[in-house]
Image (cartoon, rainbow, N blue to C red):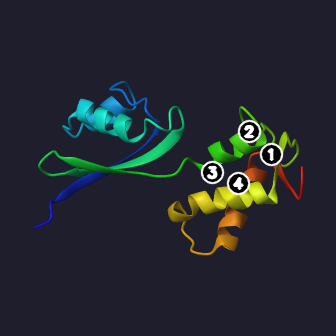
Amino acid sequence: MAKEIITQIKLQVPGGQANPAPPIGPALGQHGLNIMEFCKQFNEKTKDKQGVILPVVITVYKDKSFTFIMKEPPVAVALKKAAGLAKASPEPGRNFIGQVTHEEVAEIARQKMRDLNTTKLESAVRMVAGSARSMGIKVVDKK
């Protein structure tokens, strides 16, 4: 028989750097989970992705056990990396602070495909391009 699920916790944690400090400690502690066990498992699975922000969904069961699923880094993080930026524009739409090519947008869309709510690459590319515009990043044909 399947375990009874109590809740799901969604966090964004840097790869290989999970520790009991906020936001992980309080989020897991309020459900009575072993915080250090999660940190050990997460850090072991993400040791090759040091420092990359990874969304994680932790499923909490009635017997205080848990499982977790890691997703691909957020589109915004990938776009900033591709454009070589530290942060997005404070005035998107008016002030463009970087640019990415259509090829880079398509590659980011391919990587995020399993996390997006579409099965068509064309739709995923449009979603990523929209995120780029809302961050003040122009999508151009070639650099």
* Residues at circles 4 and 1 in contact by the CB criterion of under 8 Å: no
* Label 4, label 3: how far apart the Cα atoms are: 7 Å
Question: Where does label 4 land, which residue?
Answer: 131
The quarter of the picture where the N terminus appears is bottom left
Q: Give the amino acid at mark 2.
A: Ala
- Could you say which is closer to the camera, residue 93 or residue 78? 78
* Disc assigned to residue 75: 3
Q: Is the C-beta separation of discs 4 and 3 under 8 Å?
A: yes
Q: Secondary structure at mark 3?
A: helix
* 27 or 108, nearer to the observer: 108
Label 4 and label 1: CA atoms lie apart by 9 Å
Q: Which residue is mark 1?
A: 136
Q: Is residue 54 above or below residue 123?
A: above
The residue that label 2 is drawn on is 88
Q: Amino acid at mark 3?
A: Val
Q: Is residue 110 left or right of residue 88?
A: left
Q: Residue at x 15, y 60 (%)?
A: 3
